Image: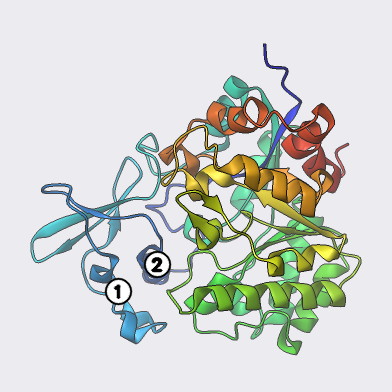
Amino acid sequence: MTEYPTIFDGHAYCFPDVRGLMGFPTPEVKHIHVQKSMANHHVQPWLIRDHSPGSTSTLMDDSRWPDDDAIRDVNFRPTTHGRYEWTVDGEDYVKQYFPPSITDMGYPPENLIAEMDYANVTGTLLHRNPYLGIGNDFIADCVQKFPDRIFGLAHVPEWTVEDEPDAAASMVEGAVRDRGLSGLQFLTSQLHLYGKNPDWSSDGFTLFWDRFASLGVPVFFSLSINEPKREPLLDHYLLELQRLTTWMEQYPETPVVMTHGFLWTLFADKDGFQLPDELWRPFENPNLSLQILLPIGLGDKFDYPLPQAQPLLRDLVRNIGADRLMWGTDMPIVMRHWTYQQNIDFIVKYCDFLSKQELALIMGGNTKRLLGLS
């Protein structure tokens, strides 16, 4: 019988009904943001009539990016059962962003707790994405409902930070000091979404980062997630890693986590992964940890139990260390591919090269230590 460590999910979501405002100031602002985001998301849309592959170019004119008028007038809308739909020349298209079980297009904390109970997950850290809602009250309310099980990260609209650093800093300070959130998630892709200065380590962000660093909580950076297609993509990604290194040198006391792991598909082929040496350089800084969310990134390319990830995980342990790797799931979105239990078993049951101590650290110990829960 497999002996399971105490499990703490380092990366999950709760979100309000995405058919509502989700914290955006107006329906129009929300609509533009979500349609631009979904137009750049990797999930393949399909034609409702015959399930043939569709193109996200029907959602957006790439030549006009990043202007708001890049989105096409196609009655883009969230519907039910995890679907976004739109209509072009009388034909309806679907992007199944959430799993079909998200019938009401929201995921309240009670739903996540039920999944956690079934899979024997003791706690979780809620992450953020603007097209799942902005503002910090919803997440803070989730934490308040289940204070011993659910913890949450603050968010600030990244596209406002350089122009309004005082307001942005105050928003995060209030979320951490007054609403009990445990850190900040910062998605660099949102700067590109609005055509803002992409160098989040530059002087224009200093006032904001100085005030954030004084809070003494960790920052979770999501690098190059859901950005528009730019070539060469690898060069752009390595530039983001350089910015991360620069930022950590500026704020040596702040714990840092890179969410989602690396952009795995950049380094994957049919046989496995080839990771360049440049990926390891930011981890020369001992303050940096890496989340490993392999099923959400690779579940549509490789079958369970993902044997291709075993040598990859060996590389991560060897080059970064088990004491700086954090398991997470991306629940409930990962259920497009795998169940919650499979997200656990593919490491606990099939990566038998990991010691009990390494498993305990990766499957929750490191995240709990970062949050001050150990």
Q: Is residue 123 above or below residue 315?
A: above
Name the image quarter holding residue 366.
Answer: top right
Other residues around mark 2 within 10 Å, as few (<14) / some (14–19) / many (≥20): some
Nearer the observer, 119 or 74: 119
Q: Position of residue 220 (x, y in %)?
A: 71, 59
Given the current orientation, which residue lies at the most extreme front position? Answer: 271
Q: Label 1 to label 2, Cα distance in Å?
A: 9 Å
Does the image show residue 329? Answer: no
Given the current orientation, which residue lies at the most extreme right position? Answer: 253
Q: Position of residue 48 (x, y in %)?
A: 16, 49
Nearer the observer, 270 or 187: 270
Along the polypeptide, which appears first: circle 1 or circle 2? 2
Classify mark 1: helix, strand or loop: loop
Mark 1 belongs to which amino acid?
Met
Nearer the observer, 337 or 266: 266
With 96 as the anchor, is 268 left or right in this view?
Answer: right
Name the image quarter holding residue 365.
Answer: top right
Residue drawn at point x = 8 percent, y = 61 percent: 90
Name the image quarter holding residue 323.
Answer: top right
Q: Which residue is mark 1?
A: 60
Mark 2 belongs to which amino acid?
Asn
Q: Which residue is mark 2?
A: 40
Q: Is residue 32 above or below residue 369?
A: below
Query: In the rendered view of the protein, which quadrant contains the C terminus?
Result: top right
Residue drawn at point x = 17 percent, y = 47 percent: 51
Nearer the observer, 370 or 306: 306
Residue drawn at point x = 87 percent, y = 44 percent: 372
Query: In the rendered view of the protein, which quadrant contains the N terminus?
Result: top right
Does the image show residue 37? Answer: yes
Residue drawn at point x = 84 percent, y = 76 percent: 210
Q: Position of residue 337 (x, y in %)?
A: 43, 38
